[in-house]
Amino acid sequence: MRWTTRIAAAALIAILQACGTPPLQAPPPPPAALEARPAVTILISIDGFRVDYLQRGATPNLARLAAQGISGPMRPSFPSKTFPNHWTLVTGLVPDHHGIVGNRMEDPARPGETFTTASDAPYWWNAAPPIWVEAERAGIRTGTVFWPGANVAWGSTVPRPDHGDYAGGTRPRDWLQYNQAVNDTQRVDTVLDWLRRPAGSRPRFVTLYFDRVDVVGHAQGPDSPQVTQAAAEVDQRIGMLVDGLAALHQPANIVVVSDHGMSETSDTRVIPLGLPRDSYQLIEAGPFAALTPLPGKEALVEQTLLGRHPHMECWRKGEIPAHFRYGKNPRIAAIFCLAEPRWTIAEKLPAAPFTRGEHGYDNRSADMAALFVAAGPAFRHGTVPAFDNVDIAPLLRDLIDLPPKTGLDGNDAPFRGLLQPR
C-alpha cells in the first residue's frame, strides 16, 4: 500500500473512532448541599374553633398533625372572648392581669374613651409584653400575619398625631395590619414568602390568624354544616402551609390553637335586663353584660340585678367568683352579669327570630373548650390532659429559646413530658 493510501486509511479510522467513542467528560459536580435551617415556630390561631370540630372528619391536616405530635382540650381564660384570649395566649397572663378584659371596655383613667377591637393605642395594651416583643428584644426575629395587638407599637407612650402612629415602641419585625379582605391563601403565602428569605432576614417566630370559622359560627351557629365547611377550608390552608414548608426544607414547630369555642343561641333564649334605659351605661352585652349604674341609680340597678336569676347571675365586680380570676382590674365594669351557655343577655327581647353562635360564657363550659394541636421536631407524640391557655406562652418561650419568666399565670408543666430533650 502506498504511503498516501496508508495515511488516508489511518485518517478514516481515526474519524470513525471519534464518531463511535465520545470524548471523556468531567463528572458532574455534586448537588449543592441543602441549607441546614433551624426550626421556625409558627403559632396559628383558628378563631372560634371549638375543640370537638376536630372530630367531624373534615380536618385531615389537623388530624395528621395531632397524630404526629400532641393535642388536647384547652380552657380559655375568662371571659371567653377573642381579644382577651389572644392576648393571654401570647402573654401568659389572665385578662384581669394583662388588661384586655373584653372586646369592648372603658378605663376610669381615660374618661370618654372606649376600647374596641379596632383600638391600637399602646395605652390599652402596655400592661404586659407579648412574646414577640420579648423575642425581638432578645435578638429573635419575629413576624405576624395578623394577631390581635400585633400592630401595636408596644411600650410607646408618645402619640404622633401627624403620623397617626406612636413614637418608639416595639412591633414584630414583619407585621400586617389586620384586613379581613386578605384571604387565607394570601395569609399562608405571606408566611412562606418570609421563610424563603436568606437566614439573616428570616423570622424564627411567626403568628398566623384565621377568622373564617368564627365568622361563620356566629352567623350560622356551631352545629351548622357551614361551620364544618369553614373548618375544612381552613384545614386545607394548613395543609398548604405544611406542604410549602416541606418544599423549602424548613423544619417547623407548629402550634395550632383557638381562642374559645362556640355555643348555639336563639331568640327563644334571651334574658332582658329589665332596667330603665336611663339608669345604666351598657359596655357590652350578649353571653355576659358589663354595665355601670348612672349617678343616683346605683340602688335601683343593684336591687334589680344582683344575685341569681333564671339562666343568669349578676355580681358587683369585686364579688365575681374567684375561679373566674376576674374582677380586680379597673377596666371591668361595676356590675357584671353572666348568662348560662346557650342564653344571651340583652336590653330587651328581640324583634325577630334568630339562631346563631356566641361565646363569652363560663370558660369551664364544654362549648367554650378550645383547640390545641402541636407538632414538629420539638414534640413527641401524646395527649395533653385539659389545661389552661395561660400555659401556651411558657411553651412558646421553650420553643424559641427564651428563658423562663417569673410572674406569669401559667407554666409549661403540661408539656414537659411531651417535649424532645434539647
Image: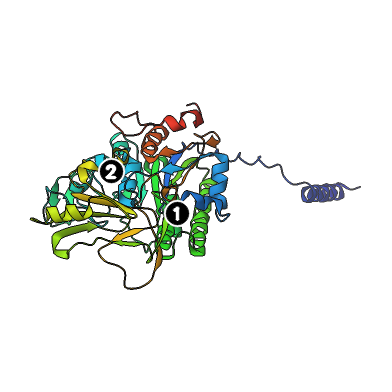
In the foreground, 368 or 93 = 368
Task: Report the residue at 33% width, 60% height from top.
Answer: 179
Distance of label 1 from label 2 (alpha carbons): 29 Å
Residue 162 lies in quadrant: bottom left
Q: Quadrant of residue 132?
A: top left
- Left or right? Give the position of 328 relative to 248: left
Crowd band around label 1 with a 10 angstrom C-alpha radius: few (<14), some (14–19), many (20+): many
Under mark 2, the amino acid is Pro
Q: Secondary structure at mark 2?
A: helix
Secondary structure state at the residue bearing disc 1: helix
Picture coordinates of residue 80, whole percent (x, y) = 35, 49
Q: Is residue 209 left or right of residue 52?
A: left
Residue at which label 1 appears: 188
Is residue 261 shown above or below 393?
A: below
Rendered image: mark on residue 95: 2
Residue 76 visible, this orientation: yes
The image shows residue 203, relative to residue 301, as above or below, that is above
* Count of numbered badges drawn on the protein: 2
280 horizontally vs 398: left or right? left
User: Residue 362 placed where, x, y %?
Assistant: 36, 47
Q: Amino acid at mark 1?
A: Val
Q: Earlier in the sequence, mark 1 or mark 2?
A: 2
On the image, the x and y values in percent for residue 110 come to: 12, 51
Given the current orientation, which residue lies at the most extreme bottom position?
A: 352
Compared to residue 145, the image places residue 133 above or below, namely above
Name which residue lies at 28% across and 43% down: 95
Whether pointer 1 and pointer 2 mark residues with C-beta atoms closer than 8 Å, the reply is no
